[in-house]
């Protein structure tokens, strides 16, 4: 009986728990650790939700500050637009006999390559170009019928534009651009730059994107960052179109400091260097970022990575209030500005977000979470090593009880246990059961010539050959001395005899290395001599031979083994002598 079956079993524990106590300990510790981790994960989840809510709240505050700045500029632009519209309407019906000499002189010079209109001292000059210069410029057309009214509005705006600048550092310049081919900008630019500047107006988003075909809703637009005229400085522009009687008459544009927008967006700090915020319009253009970017043509979602390519700007703008999306490698927070035309975005990497989460964990609690699994692992490791030692010791004892120490084959006791199982199986299903019994021929001579150590080598090599040449289900055993047996479940007498014959031939061809301490005289002058040996084998079968018990089968196999020895050795005998023949006398081995 295996040693494990002798272990007592409490009524309240299954046998598996007693047979593997280290697993019970591991499961108990794992349960405690799992409960601890569950509590910790719940706290982490709560902290994660707080961090997400904090990001959404901060983004809403940024959006409010940005909206306040935009509202201020929108008010100024709306005021200038409405004022210009009113002036144009007034001048469209001039008083009889009343004319402005400065306007008339500018009107008379309208076909000059570059012309100016006189303005009061200190006001921004009104500068225009000829119709030929305007040819081919989209959004510009010389309309003589509207020219006097447009010049009148520009003359009045030249004074107002300077007043709208004030001392605020937000604005760099403010410009009235007439679709009739002239402009007034504050601060002023040299008149000789007028042709190049008008060509630039025609190509810039703050004018081009406000034309009727591109802006049918006559909305205020925010241009993406661009390089200042004849400069490398980056800026952005808010602009609004001017319509009078449904006719496009020009644009009022105010340049906004990109640095100021970045400050409103919140520049990255040393504490959060990976935090990126962007201002996006409904067309997917990124107007500004809270950090310097080498490109001025930023579009959704190129700067945010591949994780957001499946999310269009319309999807984000369809969300009312704050929103959040999780993608591969990060989170995207977004908040529409009050007007609904722009959206504030904040991209946060997963590593950064969870870094904020872990920074909010109580340090003592964090140390406990780290120490508890470590202590549990150490305890489990020690218990596991201790139980593994006793299990290995029990296994070793079981091997000593069941195995032959020299050959590592089954001993006689274990061979009997295996026979009992095979016999019970044969009783149930009627399967065959055979047995071989082997004995080394002249083994005493091997010991006398080569020494007992070399004889042990022969026994070990025979055991190896049995393991290599017999079936996996066969049970080879050493019964004692040079006697071996093989239990062959499911094999008939003929099959067992064939296997025995193959084994006999194999063993006869195996050379065995003698022991290092073998007598030198044993080699008989040949240093490379090897030990050769043969075996005699007796075969018995439970059904055909009538033996049902282990002793009966061993007796039959042993009788036939001695018959093989009596008839010359190195042979297999699978049947008894025929009737009338004398039984061969036993032969001393």
Image (spheres, helix red, strand yellow):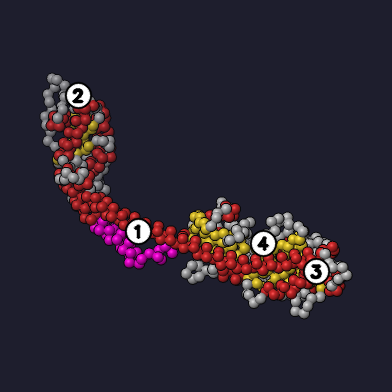
Is disc 3 placed on a helix, strand or loop? Answer: helix
Instruction: Say which of marks 1 and 2 sits in front.
Output: 1
Name which residue lies at 77% across and 67% down.
Answer: 87
Is disc 1 placed on a helix, strand or loop? Answer: helix
Q: Name the residue that disc number 3 marks.
A: 151
Q: Residue furthest front?
A: 96
Residue 563 left/right relative to 496: left
Q: How far apart are the two marked residues, 4 and 3, measured between alpha carbons?
A: 23 Å
Closer to the N terminus: mark 3 or mark 1? Answer: 1
Q: Residues within 10 Å of mark 4 (few under 14, many from 20)?
A: some
Point out residue 118 in the picture as x, y percentages from the top left corner: 81, 75
Closer to the N terminus: mark 1 or mark 4? Answer: 1
Q: How far apart are the two marked residues, 1 and 4, measured between alpha carbons?
A: 50 Å
Q: How far apart are the two marked residues, 3 and 1, measured between alpha carbons?
A: 73 Å
Q: How far apart are the two marked residues, 2 and 4, measured between alpha carbons?
A: 108 Å
Closer to the N terminus: mark 1 or mark 2? Answer: 1
Q: Nearer the viewer, residue 274 or 56?
A: 56
Closer to the N terminus: mark 2 or mark 4? Answer: 4
Name which residue lies at 52% across and 63% down.
Answer: 60
Q: How far apart are the two marked residues, 1 and 2, measured between alpha carbons?
A: 72 Å
Instruction: Say which of marks 3 and 2 sits in front.
Output: 3
Q: Residues within 10 Å of mark 1 (few under 14, many from 20)?
A: some
Name which residue lies at 55% across and 57% down.
Answer: 305
Region of the chain picked out in magenta, as a range: 355-382
Q: Name the residue that disc number 4 marks.
A: 220
The answer to whether 508 is drawn above or below residue 102 in the figure is above
Q: Name the residue that disc number 2 marks.
A: 544
Closer to the N terminus: mark 3 or mark 2? Answer: 3
Quarter holding residue 261: bottom right
Q: Name the residue that disc number 1 marks.
A: 40
The answer to whether 521 is drawn above or below residue 183 in the figure is above
């Amino acid at each position: 009986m295996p040693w494990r079956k002798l272990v007592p079993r409490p009524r309240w524990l299954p046998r598996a728990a007693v047979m593997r106590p280290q697993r019970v300990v591991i499961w108990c510790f794992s349960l405690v650790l799992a409960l601890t981790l569950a509590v910790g994960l719940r706290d982490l989840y709560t902290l994660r939700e707080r961090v997400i809510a904090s990001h959404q709240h901060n983004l809403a505050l940024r959006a409010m500050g940005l909206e306040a700045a935009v509202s201020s500029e929108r008010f100024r632009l709306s005021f200038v637009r409405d004022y210009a519209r009113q002036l144009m309407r007034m001048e469209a019906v001039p008083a009889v006999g009343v004319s402005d000499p400065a306007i008339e002189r500018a009107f008379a010079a309208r076909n000059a390559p570059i012309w100016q209109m006189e303005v009061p001292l200190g006001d921004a000059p009104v500068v225009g170009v000829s119709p030929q210069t305007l040819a081919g410029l989209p959004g510009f057309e010389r309309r003589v019928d509207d020219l006097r009214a447009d010049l009148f509005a520009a003359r009045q705006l030249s004074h107002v534009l300077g007043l709208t600048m004030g001392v605020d550092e937000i604005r760099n310049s403010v410009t009235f651009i007439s679709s009739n081919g002239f402009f007034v900008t504050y601060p002023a630019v040299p008149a000789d730059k007028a042709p190049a500047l008008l060509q630039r107006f025609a190509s810039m988003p703050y004018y081009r994107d406000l034309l009727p075909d591109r802006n049918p809703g006559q909305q205020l637009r925010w241009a993406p960052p661009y390089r200042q005229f004849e400069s490398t400085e980056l800026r952005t522009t808010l602009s609004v179109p001017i319509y009078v009687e449904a006719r496009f008459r020009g644009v009022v544009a105010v340049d906004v400091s990109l640095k100021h927008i970045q400050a409103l967006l919140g520049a990255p700090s040393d504490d959060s260097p990976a935090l990126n915020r962007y201002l996006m319009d409904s067309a997917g253009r990124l107007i500004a970022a809270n950090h310097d970017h080498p490109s001025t043509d930023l579009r959704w979602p190129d700067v945010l990575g591949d994780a957001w390519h499946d999310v269009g700007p319309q999807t984000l703008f369809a969300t009312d209030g704050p929103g959040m999306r999780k993608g591969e490698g990060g989170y995207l927070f977004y908040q529409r500005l009050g007007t609904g035309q722009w959206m504030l975005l904040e991209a946060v990497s997963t590593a950064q977000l969870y870094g904020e989460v872990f920074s909010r964990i109580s340090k003592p609690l964090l140390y406990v979470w780290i120490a508890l699994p470590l202590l549990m692992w150490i305890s489990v490791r020690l218990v596991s090593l201790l139980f593994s030692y006793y299990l290995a010791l029990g296994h070793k004892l079981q091997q000593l009880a069941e195995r032959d120490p020299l050959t590592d084959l089954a001993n006689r006791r274990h061979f009997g246990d295996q026979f009992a199982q095979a016999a019970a199986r044969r009783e149930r299903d009627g399967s065959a059961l055979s047995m071989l019994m082997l004995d080394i021929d002249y083994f005493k001579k091997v010991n006398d010539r080569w020494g007992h150590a070399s004889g042990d080598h022969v026994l070990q090599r025979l055991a190896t050959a049995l393991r290599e040449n017999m079936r996996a289900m066969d049970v080879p055993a050493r019964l004692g001395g040079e006697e071996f047996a093989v239990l062959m479940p499911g094999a008939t007498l003929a099959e067992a005899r064939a296997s025995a014959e193959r084994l006999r031939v194999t063993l006869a061809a195996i050379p065995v290395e003698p022991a290092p301490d073998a007598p030198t005289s044993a080699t008989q002058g040949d240093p490379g001599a090897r030990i050769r040996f043969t075996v005699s084998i007796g075969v018995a079968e439970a059904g055909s031979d009538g033996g049902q018990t282990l002793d009966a089968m061993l007796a039959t196999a042993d009788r036939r083994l001695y018959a093989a020895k009596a008839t010359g050795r190195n042979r297999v005998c699978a049947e008894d002598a025929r009737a009338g023949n004398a039984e061969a006398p036993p032969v001393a081995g």
